[in-house]
Image (cartoon, grey):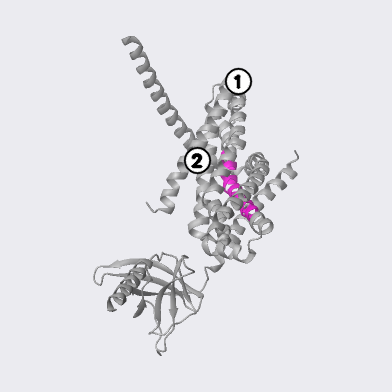
């Protein structure tokens, strides 16, 4: 009996140590990527190539889901607001919830599962098939050649995708509230414009999406680079990317919101 | 994929993203109402501000002429000190009357300025002398009941 207690305690300790180890490795890897970024930013063609795979190919899912999220917000907001006779405020509701929260967060969650997982799988597979080692043999730094361009492509495309998501959402809300239901168009826009502040709402939403972009891509490239070079290892790393970055997005969102809107 | 088409798509993507940011700031947000015009700061002491919030509009004749930038509490007069930013295009006489009004029955509260007849104009840092507090529904009901009770006693 004492033996089992000891071994389970050892297990807990082992896992904690392993987690701290990985966190340290991740931080060191993140700094390494930042240091090697200068070389890959000078060869911007590499970043553009990755922007295509990370950004352009994520566009469809972002546009479609933004439209539907906005339409649902318009419907639900209208149902509740019309009870209080203030259905014209539906524009404010849709725009504020999208620009402040849903735009950055949902776009980042979609981005993590669409692009983050792809980055991890690609880098992990390159490692498993020893392409990264081969690059090293040819004196090509794999971090500068493979990892940094993907990282920067993700960091650049995340705020743009979040902005596109928000605009599509506002358009969806407009479609439902003004075109289908018949809320007055003038008050829809004017209420929205008088209540959405550039600095407090839009700029803060933009800053949020930049943070999410760094977090998601940093996690994705690290998980790929750190994955065990087996088929199982790559699949596990891909899963971990989606889980960890989703949790990181939601946690970061809480911290950023607390700082931005409560002035803590 | 060909290099040129790839560049084209990425360019389109970046342009769409920046366009979306522009739409957000101009059409959805109120960047265009952040006039380039200068503004000046005036203050007003109110006995009770009710539910007035920072960034509430300051209106005159229903037109937005400025915004509330700060609300403090003064321990000297036990009043609320409301700081307002007024667009420099709009000058108000020294004896302007400031009152806290409500948009609709339960709507947001704003400051209404009613111009007086003084020759001198309010300048940066001036304090409005004549103010009218916010209507607090509970106080009004209380006063009404009190009046009603004293009326009944008279008979």
Left or right of residue A239, residue B83 in this image: left
In percent of width and height, residue A238 lies at 57, 28
* Label 2 environment density (alpha carbons within 10 Å; few <14, some 14–19, many ≥20): many
Q: Which mark is residue A160?
A: none
Mark 1 on the same chain as mark 2: yes
For mark 2, give the secondary structure. Answer: helix
Which residue lies at the image location 41% right of the left edge and 22% below the top edge? A15
Left or right of residue B154, residue B39 in this image: right
Q: Chain of mark 1?
A: A
Q: Quadrant of residue A239?
A: top right
Left or right of residue B7, residue B108 in this image: left
CB within 8 Å, label 1 to label 2 = no
Viewer can see residue B100: yes
Asked if A21 appears above or below A202 in the picture, the reply is above
For mark 1, give the secondary structure. Answer: helix
> Closer to the observer: label 1 or label 2?
2
Which residue lies at the image location 60% right of the left edge and 42% below the top edge? A153
Task: Based on the picture, tell me whether residue A163 belongs to the magenta stretch.
Answer: yes
Q: Nearer the viewer, residue A193 or B137?
A: B137
| Mark 1 or mark 2: whose residue is earlier in sequence | 1
Q: Which residues are magenta?
A: A151-173
Q: Which mark is residue A249?
A: 2
Q: Which mark is residue A231?
A: 1
| Most distant residue in the front direction | B155
In percent of width and height, residue A74 lies at 60, 53
Which residue lies at the image location 33% right of the left edge and 9% below the top edge? A1
Left or right of residue B23, residue A96 in this image: left
Asked if B8 appears above or below B52 in the picture, the reply is above
Q: Nearer the viewer, residue B140 or B98?
A: B140
Viewer can see residue A230: no
């Amino acid at each position: 009996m004492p033996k089992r207690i000891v071994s389970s305690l050892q297990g807990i300790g082992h896992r904690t140590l392993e987690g701290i180890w990985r966190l340290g490795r991740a931080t060191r890897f993140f700094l390494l990527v930042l240091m090697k970024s200068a070389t890959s930013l000078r060869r911007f063609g590499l970043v553009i190539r990755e922007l295509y795979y990370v950004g352009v190919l994520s566009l469809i899912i972002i546009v479609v889901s933004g439209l539907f999220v906005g339409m649902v917000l318009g419907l639900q907001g209208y149902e509740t607001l019309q009870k209080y006779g203030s259905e014209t405020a539906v524009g404010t509701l849709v725009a504020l919830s999208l620009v402040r929260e849903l735009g950055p967060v949902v776009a980042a969650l979609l981005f993590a599962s669409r692009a983050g997982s792809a980055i991890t799988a690609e880098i992990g597979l390159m490692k498993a098939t020893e392409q990264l080692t081969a690059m090293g043999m040819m004196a090509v730094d794999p971090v500068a050649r493979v990892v940094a361009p993907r990282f920067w492509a993700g960091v650049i495309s995340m705020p743009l995708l979040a902005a596109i998501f928000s605009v599509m959402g506002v358009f969806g809300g407009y479609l439902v509230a003004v075109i289908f239901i018949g809320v007055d168009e003038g008050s829809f826009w004017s209420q929205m414009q008088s209540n959405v502040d550039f600095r407090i709402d839009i700029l803060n939403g933009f800053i949020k999406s930049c943070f999410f972009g760094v977090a998601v891509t940093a996690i994705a490239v690290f998980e790929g680079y750190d994955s065990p070079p087996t088929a199982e290892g790559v699949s596990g790393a891909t899963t971990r990317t989606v889980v960890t970055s989703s949790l990181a997005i939601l946690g970061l969102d809480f911290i950023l919101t607390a700082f931005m809107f409560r002035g803590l | 994929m060909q290099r040129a088409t790839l560049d084209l798509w990425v360019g389109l993507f970046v342009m769409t993203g920046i366009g979306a940011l522009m739409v957000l700031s101009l059409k959805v947000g109120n960047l265009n109402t952040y006039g380039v015009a200068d503004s000046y700061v005036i203050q007003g002491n109110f006995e009770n501000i009710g539910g007035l919030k920072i960034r509430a509009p300051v209106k005159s004749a229903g037109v937005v002429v400025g915004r509330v930038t700060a609300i403090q509490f003064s321990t000297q007069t036990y009043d609320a000190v409301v700081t307002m930013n007024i667009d420099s295009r709009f000058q108000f006489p020294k004896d302007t009357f400031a009152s806290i009004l409500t948009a609709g029955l339960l709507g947001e509260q704003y400051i209404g300025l009613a111009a007086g007849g003084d020759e001198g104009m309010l300048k940066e840092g001036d304090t409005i002398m004549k103010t009218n507090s916010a209507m607090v529904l509970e106080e009004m009901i209380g006063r009404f009941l009190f009046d009603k009770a004293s009326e009944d006693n008279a008979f």
